[in-house]
Image (tube, rainbow, N blue to C red):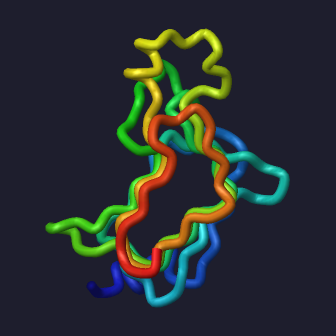
Amino acid sequence: MTLRNPSGPIKGGDRLLLLSGYHGEITVMDSYQNEPIVVEAASGHTPKIKSLRCLGASKWVFRGLSISPSHVEPYQTVSYQVSLENHDFRGPCREVTVENCTLFSVWDSSCWSIDDWNNLPPSGISADGDDCVVRGNYLRNVDFGISATGKRV
C-alpha cells in the first residue's frame, strides 16, 4: 500500500468539485493517499453518477452525489450502487467516506410490478473496509439498504 502517482495533478488534500450533469461510473482502484481526496458536489449543483466502487483505496471522501442507474438510458441495474471493497488482489479499502448522497434505483417505482421489484432495484451501499464512514445518505427504492463489515465501520 503505497502512494499512487504522488507527483500527479491530483493528490491527497485536493478537492474535486463536480458540477451538475452526468459523470458516469466512478471507480477508485489501487489509490492510497496520505491525506483525503474529496470528491463532492459544487455548491448549488447536483452531479449524477451511475455507481461508485472503491477497491484497494484509502482516504477518499465522496459527498453530495446523486447515484442511480436511472441516470443513463437504457436502465441497467448494478449489484450495489456504492461498493467499498476489501479485495484479495487489489488490497484493503479503508478510511473511505460516503456522505450526504442520494441513492435510488428509479425515483418513482409506482408502476413497477412484483417481477420488476425482484429484478430491477440494485442494493444501496456495501461498506467492507476498516474505518469506512457511511452517513447522512438517503436511499430510495433499493433492494438491500446498507451492509457494513470491517473494524470501526
Q: Residue at x 65, y 55 (%)?
A: 137
Q: Is residue 113 left or right of residue 18?
A: left
Q: Is residue 46 above or below residue 10?
A: above
Which of these two is toward me, 30 or 110?
110
Q: Is residue 142 above or below residue 1?
A: above
Residue at x 73% of width, y 46% of height: 46
Q: Does residue 91 appear left or right of residue 70 in this picture? A: left
Q: What quarter of the picture does the N terminus occupy?
A: bottom left
Q: Residue furthest right?
A: 44
Residue plotted at (55% across, 37% down): 68
Location of residue 39 by image quarter:
bottom right
- Residue 116: give x, y in percent of width and height: 45, 15
Task: Residue at 41% x, 44% y: name it.
Answer: 80
Q: Nearer the viewer, residue 80 or 39?
A: 80
What residue occupies the far front of the structure in this picture? Answer: 114
| Residue 65 x/y as whole percent | 64, 51
Which quarter of the figure has residue 61?
Answer: bottom right
